[in-house]
Amino acid sequence: MSRKRRLDVESPSVSEVIEVAKEPSVGLRLRAKRVKSRRASESASLAAQEQNQGKMMLAGLIDIEERTARLEKAEIEEEARTVVGILQSPLVVQNRFVRSKAAAVLATLLCSPHCVGAVVDQGVEELLLQLKRDESWDVKSQIVVALAKIAPCVSERTLIDELAAVAKTIVGERYHAVRSSALRLICSLAVREGATQETQRLLSQFAHDRDNRVRQSALSSLLYLHTEGVKLDLPVYDNACECLKDDSEAVRLKALRIVQIIGVSFPDNPVPLQDDVSTEIRLVDDAFVKICNMVNDLSMQVRAQASRLLGLFKGVGFQFLEQTLDKKLMSHLRKKKTEHEKRKERHAAGRSTAGWDSGRQWGSGWSQDNLNPDSISLMNQGACGAFVHGLEDEYLEVRMASLDALCQLAMEFPQFSVLSLDFLVDMFNDEIDTVRLKAIDGLRHVISSVELREDQLETILGVLL
């Protein structure tokens, strides 16, 4: 009896439960909770289904890409239509990874030697439509890269003009990957149609973009033009020289190569000195000095590349080669004037010809050296001691590159081989055996034009023994 009374007290009656359920606020909350949980489960199942479908599409695209090299012409055209169908499918609207991969695979198929004609043009048209309707910056970038890859295979003239118009339009987009891809497309079209000065000027302008990845892409495009047989114009040289001071290591590496290419292509073209506009030197000498200065760069990769490129200068002046083995700093490449010339200039300027200011009259003296403070840089040493720094570098890669360049120049200039012999023999004492072997091999190439002294021969024999 007591147990029954306890149950009656603890558990609510049926009438009370019915009354609570009839309250409108509680009923609405229960109904909303059930609807919310049902929608959450449905959305989770749809997301899982879409994810599985995306994985299946990606697997299929990867399989097509791997089989491209083994496909025949009819199979390639069929697979290209399959990939175009994937791009048009509503299932890939929310999956940017599938769209990006589909664009890359389509470019691989259309660039196959078995795929020509109307199939290529249809694929390009589909990619252009996808570029217009897609809102993902990553997908747009991949589509433009695909178009740049396919551009040399396009046969229809109207499509080529449309590709050029699209490239000029999207090259100003705010997303760095799209701008970089657009520069690649412009470069690809320039190789096909012939690179003009306007195209090279446009690429040079983007070498000063706010994003270092775009700057790197612009310089890479210029280098690609050179590898395809296009001669880089002289105005590109100034922009490349400015890029030598860039914060990005990759940009400096590519700028070094462009400076060397243009310096060798226009060796006798006169250029004014940075500190003295009235004085001109040859372009090949100016490029050599600028690359020598990069041997002091903070990056090991840049120092090694600069040292390696020094050996490619065949027509550089001998006075600049001498400076690479001497640590005495040149006076900013300024021409030294005799005392007679200095006094003549003072007299022509209406100033005192005395060497020092007497102090009796304000401004009566003549400054011995009117230097612009902004033009003086403690790090800008030009060709001064470039090989000395390179051969004494802490990294193996820089020392090896410096040895290669030193031997190449020694074989080109017999007088320079005599000056460099001491440095070459000194590398026999390097702590790394690879460097010592490189020094032995370098000495073998220049030994015909030099004579060894007794102390040098003792050093060589000491290493060999």
Image: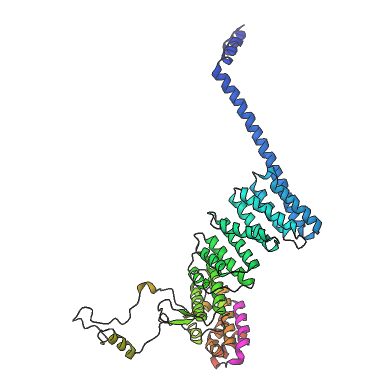
Residues rendered magenta in the picture:
431-451
Position of the C terminus by quadrant: bottom right
Which corner quadrant of the image does residue 45 belong to? Answer: top right
Say if residue 395 shows up in the picture: no
Residue positioned most to the top: 1
Residue visible at 33% across and 78% down? 370
Comparing 119 with 24, the one in front is 119
- Above or below: residue 149 compared with residue 278: above
In screen coordinates, is 331 left or right of 28?
A: left
Q: How many marks?
A: 0
Question: Residue 133's x, y, as percent?
Answer: 62, 48
- Above or below: residue 251 compared with residue 60: below
Colour convention: rainbow
- Above or below: residue 221 compared with residue 87: below
Determine the main secondary structure of the stretch shown in magenta.
helix
Question: Residue 195's x, y, as percent?
Answer: 60, 69
Position of the N terminus by quadrant: top right
Say if residue 443 shows up in the picture: yes
Q: Is residue 437 magenta?
A: yes
Residue visible at 74% across and 56% down? 119
Comparing 140 with 194, the one in front is 194
Comparing 382 with 180, the one in front is 180
Question: Residue 123's x, y, as percent?
Answer: 71, 54
Which corner quadrant of the image does residue 398 belong to? Answer: bottom right
- Above or below: residue 16 compared with residue 52: above
Q: Is residue 89 magenta?
A: no
Residue positioned most to the left: 360
Question: Residue 164's x, y, as percent?
Answer: 61, 60
